[in-house]
Amino acid sequence: MKESLTLLSDIVATANDLFYDRNKKVDTLMGIMDKTLRKQGMNADAITIDCITMDKKIVLVLHDSKPDSVNIAFGDKAGVVHSSSEHVLKDVSVKQILAMMEMNFLN
């Protein structure tokens, strides 16, 4: 696994644990896609955070062509994207991901 994916997955895992500690009735599932997108011809890795009961998903995409940034998309399990934004990778924090999860999965 690439270093950037490892670092980001650690941040997301920590945020996911904190989210669960605060919201025990809302289950989430974190996934790492380090080969799936590449097999589909996309030069990128991704981390997904699914909230199955709410039918919502957050996807964090690390494109090889933009090694210093991460695209974060909010959508549903069907793959419909409601909004997305690009962030500087080194600025992404546990606090920021936790806030995104709370905003997206608790409303």
Image (tube, rainbow, N blue to C red):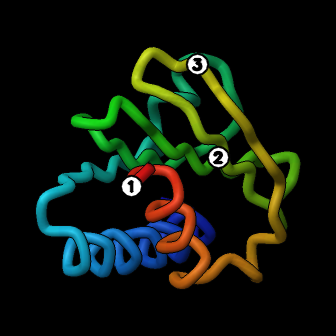
- Callout 3: helix, strand or loop? loop
Q: Residue furthest front?
A: 107
In the rendered structure, the answer to whether residue 77 lies left or right of residue 45 reads left
Label of residue 20 in the image: none
| Nearest-to-viewer mark from 3 and 1 | 1
- Counting residues from the start of the chain, the first of labels 3 and 2 encountered is 2
Instruction: Tell me which residue sits at (77%, 48%) in the image.
Output: 64
Q: Residue 67 placed where, x, y %? A: 81, 60
In the rendered structure, the answer to whether residue 106 lies left or right of residue 23 reads right
Name the residue type under label 3.
Val
- Position of residue 84 relative to residue 11, above or below, is above
- Position of residue 52 relative to residue 19, above or below, is above
- Callout 1: helix, strand or loop? loop
| Nearest-to-viewer mark from 2 and 1 | 1
Structural distance between the alpha carbons of marks 2 and 1: 23 Å
User: For mark 1, what is the residue?
Assistant: 106
Q: Nearer the viewer, residue 14 or 106?
A: 106
- Dots 3 and 2: beta carbons under 8 Å? no
User: For mark 2, what is the residue?
Assistant: 61
User: For mark 3, what is the residue?
Assistant: 80
- Counting residues from the start of the chain, the first of labels 2 and 1 encountered is 2
Instruction: Tell me which residue sits at (32%, 72%) in the image.
Output: 19
Structural distance between the alpha carbons of marks 3 and 2: 15 Å
- Callout 2: helix, strand or loop? strand
